[in-house]
Image: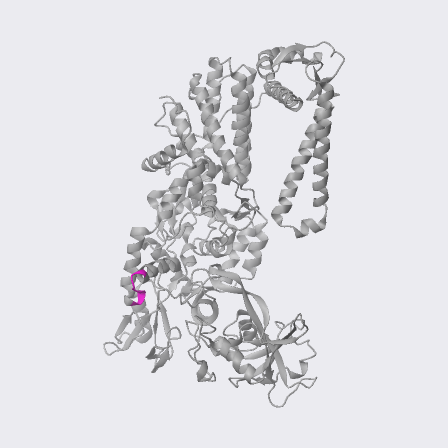
């Protein structure tokens, strides 16, 4: 059936996405082939395709399709992350919309609602990935909450706990008071907030004074409310102002707490007063200072509950007026911050910020205005509170050692290498990893708590819900097990088999058992489960054939922004549990930015919807753009003009295939190149071989841009623009065979980047429904460049290009037939290529006589000069005058732009996009001046 006249991406994309998947072509049965494995970074079940996903998944699909064409058993694991916080928030918002809430349900009933939501609405991104053309193994789609995956998560937790690599500890966490859970650093966004910097007097105790006679130490803070839980004042040991009071005490206003003055390098003598108030229970730096000062975490004061409202500290010194207040003003109601400032001012302990107005008046303010970098929860949207809680931690320092060694000895190859320094810097300074989250949706921590032997019941307070006072044991024994049977056996071994033991879901007391064990209510951090992705998705801990065959994975493609949160943790868990690296290569790509280089964000309104781009340009064009622009170590700027250009590339290829069809050129039947005698055919076969080699080298080095540009240049320039032009009018059987073979090789080489159009052309170009392109073979041309043919055709192309350029510069119509005088040394070549010279170079006469006197255009091709007389063809004087004026104008603009770019003031102070535009304009004017100079030179 003849090809459609116009290329319509939408018409073919849906067809082939369904066809490939329904026929199982994403994972053909190749048990004896070399395995190739890549796992897709699992998107959130709540997620939708964004432009970063489009880049990440395009690069993965390019590799998978390439390796599949090379005959490998290519497995691309696909699945979704359960996204604990995000998913629970979505479902809770649905409940709120119907005047309902999570706490109206039991934990089990709420989790059932989450599963119901997933079945009805979750996972829309999988359909969007299919639109992009992702050839994942959809038949084995994974989910981090699937039963087999949950078994893997529990086993990892239990085994790490047995080894002492998971433990419970009291430390500061990023606490989200809105969501009432600890969150990771990745879920914290820093915003600039207009705030204040308050200066307070802290009275020295016991009649002590500073050397200058002051009886107080000045401290400053952006969070006055935290003074209610201050435990020290830090000064630098080398600061002469305070050396005499190190080891002495201050008496805190409001609480009357007596706290020590400690020496610590955290206090910088050059900043402010050089003295720092220390609140170890509510500041990460202060926590470290407190530990160095000898405070144990359990002794550090906590003044806030899970809602960030003030509660009484363990020493009972916070006045009743503060209890129950929010940490700062909320909903127009003053909080603890405002009351602290008011009381400090009333008591004379506030040092005002004094400024002089424009009129010369002295004005006092309570605080110095400051722009403060403030942490917010990315989902809760409120200020994060450093909060001291009991959480579960992974000994990341121990687990980090094998991955670091693997990078050092090359078992893990990080591409680009420049990221190795960042990797080592983080891993060498890694902190304990908090893996517990205060949610209901997720992998529940397999830990139960019971009393220590012979411990008495007492009243305890749940810090997260302080209104709940419950009778339970003052000390706890922790039991961590694979399941309830395992935990009960551990408990019997500990307490004795004569004890009746019951497991409960919450803190409970009763009379039906001797001992109650209650389960930890928390769930695991989503990153904990996703760290198992390279092996749990293959069926581990079962010793499956998939695990044996596809672990380690070959490569991981990831954004650099999750190098620590996911990539490094996969390396830790993989090496701990599998005894080998999770992947041999870690490829880190950059960000996709707005056209002006700005980071995309909803607040800026510059976010690009990849599905909209697919609708506008087609999936193939978007994929090719992503790959062609992916240059190692650089971010990608969106560019509609390039996207349109790659859509035009697809159209050009479509039209080239229509030309072949119209001229009886059929699909190839051989993998190797056909026999060829004509120079043009020997030349194009050599060009195919060179392109295959270039692409293979680029893929081996993960240079997606070089691979994409190699096939683009060959298909557009060598094949469409030149070869098809060169064979027009002389398409014999040999040329038909060669042209059909070359078009096939283009489709195969281009397929990883543009799968839809290439499959459509492949199938429509020949009768091979049982041999789809997606599972065809990578080119094996069994040919090399023919030196003589390449020399002849390359010379012809250069000559025609020079002639066309000269005509354009001189204002001559493209079809104008000119006489050209060649050196005698080129006679054999011009005789051999006479037909092409007549048709493409549009030469009316080829002469080997001396060039007649008068003006002529000088064409230098490979060191030989060909002259084209211009007397009688153009008005030489007028053309020289026109070119001279145009050159002067271009040179003036070029030099003006060069002056701006050489001015440090402009380069340093102007907006980056203005500098980039000036550089682009300068390059354009420089090229224009060079072209006009060459045109003048041609006139002699």
Q: Is residue 783 visible?
A: no
Residue 31 appears at what percent x and percent y?
A: 37, 37
Residue 481 appears at what percent x and percent y?
A: 34, 65
| Residue displayed at 56% across by 76% down | 278
Residue 13 appears at what percent x and percent y?
A: 38, 35
Q: In front here: 497 or 851?
A: 851
| Residue displayed at 70% across by 32% down | 929
For the image, the number of numbered tags is 0
Q: Quadrant of the C terminus?
A: top right
In magenta segment, residue 711: no
| Residue displayed at 52% across by 58% down | 401
Residue span colored magenta: 97-103
Q: Quadrant location of residue 37?
A: top left
Residue 761 appears at what percent x and percent y?
A: 41, 27
Q: Is residue 151 visible?
A: yes
Q: In front here: 227 or 908?
A: 908
Q: Quadrant location of residue 480?
A: bottom left
Q: In front here: 135 or 381?
A: 381
């Amino acid at each position: 059936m003849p090809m459609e006249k116009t290329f319509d991406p939408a018409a073919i994309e849906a067809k082939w996405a369904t066809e490939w998947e329904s026929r199982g072509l994403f994972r053909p049965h190749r048990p004896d082939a070399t395995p190739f494995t890549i796992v897709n970074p699992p998107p959130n079940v709540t997620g939708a395709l964004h432009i970063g996903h489009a880049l990440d998944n395009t690069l993965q699909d390019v590799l998978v399709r390439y390796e599949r064409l090379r005959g490998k058993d290519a497995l691309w694991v696909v699945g979704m992350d359960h996204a604990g916080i995000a998913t629970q928030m979505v479902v809770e918002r649905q409940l709120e919309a119907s005047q309902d809430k999570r706490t109206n349900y039991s934990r089990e009933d709420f989790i059932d609602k989450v599963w119901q939501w997933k079945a009805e609405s979750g996972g829309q991104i999988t359909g969007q990935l299919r639109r992009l053309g992702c050839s994942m193994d959809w038949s084995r789609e994974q989910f981090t909450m699937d039963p087999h995956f949950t078994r893997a998560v529990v086993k990892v937790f239990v085994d790490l706990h047995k080894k002492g690599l998971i433990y419970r500890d009291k430390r500061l966490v990023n606490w989200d008071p809105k969501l009432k859970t600890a969150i990771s650093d990745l879920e914290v966004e820093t915003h600039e907030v207009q705030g204040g910097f308050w200066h307070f007097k802290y009275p020295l105790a016991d009649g002590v004074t500073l050397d200058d006679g002051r009886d107080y130490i000045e401290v400053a803070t952006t969070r006055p409310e935290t003074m209610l839980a201050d435990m020290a004042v830090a000064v630098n040991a080398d600061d002469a102002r305070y050396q005499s009071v190190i080891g002495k005490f201050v008496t805190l206003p409001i609480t009357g707490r007596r706290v020590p003055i400690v020496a610590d390098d955290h206090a910088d003598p050059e900043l402010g007063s050089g003295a720092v108030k220390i609140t170890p229970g509510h500041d990460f730096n202060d926590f470290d200072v407190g530990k160095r000062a000898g405070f144990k975490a359990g002794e550090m004061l906590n003044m806030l509950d899970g809602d960030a409202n003030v509660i009484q500290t363990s020493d009972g010194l916070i006045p009743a007026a503060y209890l129950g207040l929010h940490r700062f003003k909320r909903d127009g109601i003053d909080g603890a911050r405002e009351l602290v400032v008011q009381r400090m001012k009333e008591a004379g302990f506030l040092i005002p910020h004094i400024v002089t107005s424009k009129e010369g008046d002295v004005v006092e303010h309570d605080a110095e205005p400051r722009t403060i970098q403030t942490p917010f929860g990315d989902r809760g949207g409120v200020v994060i509170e450093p909060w001291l809680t009991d959480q579960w931690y992974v000994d990341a320092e121990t687990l980090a050692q094998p991955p670091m060694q693997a990078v050092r000895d090359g078992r893990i190859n990080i591409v680009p290498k420049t990221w190795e320094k960042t990797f080592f810097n983080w891993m060498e300074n890694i902190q304990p990893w908090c893996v517990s989250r205060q949610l209901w949706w997720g992998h529940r921590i397999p830990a139960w708590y019971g009393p220590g032997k012979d411990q008495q019941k007492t009243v305890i307070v749940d810090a997260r819900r302080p209104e709940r006072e419950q009778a339970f044991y003052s000390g706890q024994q922790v039991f961590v097990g694979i399941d309830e049977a395992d935990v009960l056996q551990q408990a019997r071994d500990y307490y004795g088999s004569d004890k009746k033991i019951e497991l409960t879901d919450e803190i409970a007391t009763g009379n039906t058992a001797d001992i109650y064990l209650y389960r930890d209510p928390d769930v695991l951090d989503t990153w904990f489960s996703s760290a198992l992705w390279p092996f749990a998705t293959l069926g581990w801990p079962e010793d499956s054939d998939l695990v044996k065959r596809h672990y380690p994975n070959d490569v991981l493609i990831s954004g650099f922004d999750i190098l620590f949160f996911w990539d490094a943790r996969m390396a830790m868990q993989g090496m701990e549990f599998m005894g080998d690296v999770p992947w041999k290569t870690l490829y880190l790509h950059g960000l996709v930015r707005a056209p002006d280089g700005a980071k995309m964000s909803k607040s800026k309104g510059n976010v690009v919807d990849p599905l909209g781009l697919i609708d506008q340009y087609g999936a193939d064009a978007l994929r090719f753009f992503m790959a062609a622009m992916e240059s190692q170590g650089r971010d990608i700027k969106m560019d509609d003009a390039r996207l349109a250009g790659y859509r035009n590339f697809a159209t050009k290829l479509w039209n080239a295939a229509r030309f072949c069809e119209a001229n009886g050129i059929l699909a190839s039947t051989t993998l190797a190149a056909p026999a060829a005698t004509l120079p043009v055919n020997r030349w194009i076969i050599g060009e195919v071989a060179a392109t295959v080699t270039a692409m293979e080298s680029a893929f081996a080095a993960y240079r997606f841009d070089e691979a994409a540009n190699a096939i683009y240049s060959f298909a557009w320039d060598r094949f469409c623009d030149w070869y098809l032009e060169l064979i027009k009018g002389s398409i014999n059987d040999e040329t038909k065979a060669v042209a059909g073979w070359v078009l096939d090789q283009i489709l195969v080489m281009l397929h990883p980047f543009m799968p839809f159009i290439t499959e459509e052309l492949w199938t429509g170009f020949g009768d091979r429904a049982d041999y789809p392109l997606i599972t065809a073979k990578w080119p094996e041309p069994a040919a090399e460049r023919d030196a003589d043919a390449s020399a002849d055709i390359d010379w012809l192309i250069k000559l025609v290009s020079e002639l066309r350029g000269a005509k354009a510069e001189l204002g001559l119509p493209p079809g104008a037939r000119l006489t050209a005088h060649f050196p005698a040394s080129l006679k054999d070549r011009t005789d051999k290529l006479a037909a092409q010279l007549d048709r493409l170079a549009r030469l009316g006469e080829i002469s080997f006589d001396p060039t007649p006197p008068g003006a002529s255009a000088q064409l230098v091709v490979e060191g030989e000069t060909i002259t084209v007389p211009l007397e009688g063809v153009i008005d030489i004087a007028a053309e020289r005058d026109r070119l001279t004026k145009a050159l002067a104008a271009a040179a003036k603009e070029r030099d003006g732009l060069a002056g701006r770019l050489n001015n440090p003031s402009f380069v340093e102070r102007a907006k980056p996009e203005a500098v980039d535009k000036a550089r682009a304009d300068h390059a354009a004017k420089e090229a224009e001046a060079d072209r006009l100079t060459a045109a003048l030179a041609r006139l002699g």
